Amino acid sequence: MTPTRLLDTRVGNGLSGNFVANTPRVFQVATRAGIPAAAKAVTGNVTVVNSTNAWAVYIGPNPVANPSTSTVNFKAGQVQANSLTVALSPTGTLSATYMSNPGNTTHLVFDVTGYYMAGTGGLKYVPMSPARLMDSRFSNGLYGKLPANSPRTFYVANRYGVSPSAAGITGNLTVVNSTGGWAVFVGPTAIAKPSTSTLNFNKGDVKANGLTVALGSGGSLSATYMSTAGNTTNLILDVTGYFIP
């Protein structure tokens, strides 16, 4: 599905207000943004923002105050994202826990990119050896650096072993040589001002994040570098598998 923001505690989307350390909070996923009530799991991207201290965030189907696993790890104040595939609860909810010292707080953002249903009627996943389908440093897929807030489209299907009928992919997105910080959006359609993000970073970071994303018309993807006007960056996309009917 087109990436959709289902949680942003900064603006009261899904949940309102900061997470408090070691206190799980539950938010609804199924029946929102076109996700069926019978959905069993989702793919997406979780981002931590404005944390007062370091450690981790856990996301899972059930509330856990002291999780034994983590979804994203970060330093105090860092804007850090990570992709995930996670089961939903029987009622279609997810629970998130900010793991830190007592008294600390953070905001949390969650963008959903797809969902799983019971049965065999959906798309089939085909894993493949990782292949670099886009590297703007060497005119692979795209030529030259991406200017801020100007979406650029490149083709994925029917390249490097990806099926011509592919409807979505899994992979890894890397930002290189950015002149300013913020985020990159990757999705099936060109959007100059996206409401979701795939990867967040600071100026000059070489930073990567996984993704599961639907393909657009003709098997294409669009990428937007979200930053202050005049900034530029290079992008790399490595594909690890694809979905077909």
Image: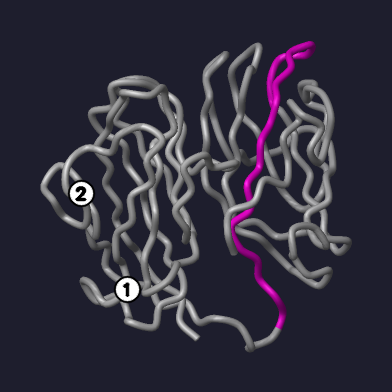
Task: Name the residue located 24 percent from the left edge and 60 percent from the top edge.
Answer: 133
Q: Which residues are magenta?
A: 99-118
Task: Give the label on residue 135, or none.
Answer: 2
**Disc 2 and disc 1 in contact, CB within 8 angstroms:** no
Residue at far right of view: 91
Residue 72: x and y, percent?
56, 36
Q: Please give the residue where the numbered disc 1 appears in the rendered image.
A: 157
| Residue type highlighted by circle 2 | Asp
Residue 31: x and y, percent?
83, 62
Task: Name the residue located 39 percent from the left edge and 60 percent from the top edge.
Answer: 221
Query: Which badge, 2 or 1, is on the more N-terminal residue?
Result: 2
The local secondary structure at tag 1 comes to loop
**Number of numbered labels in the structure image:** 2
Residue 1: x and y, percent?
59, 64
Task: Name the residue located 34 percent from the left edge and 63 percent from the top edge.
Answer: 240
* Side (left or right) of 84 relative to 134: right
Q: How many other residues sit within 10 Å of disc 1, few (<14), some (14-19) or many (≥20)?
A: many
CA distance separating discs 2 and 1: 16 Å
Residue at far left of view: 138
Magenta stretch mostly in which secondary structure?
strand
Above or below, comparing residue 43 to residue 143 in the picture? below
| Residue type highlighted by circle 1 | Ala
* Side (left or right) of 242 relative to 92: left
Nearer to us in this view, 162 or 157: 157
Quarter-of-image position of residue 13: top right
Tell me, yes or no, whether the highlighted magenta stretch contains residue 72. no
Residue 46: x and y, percent?
60, 40
Report the colour scheme.
Answer: one colour
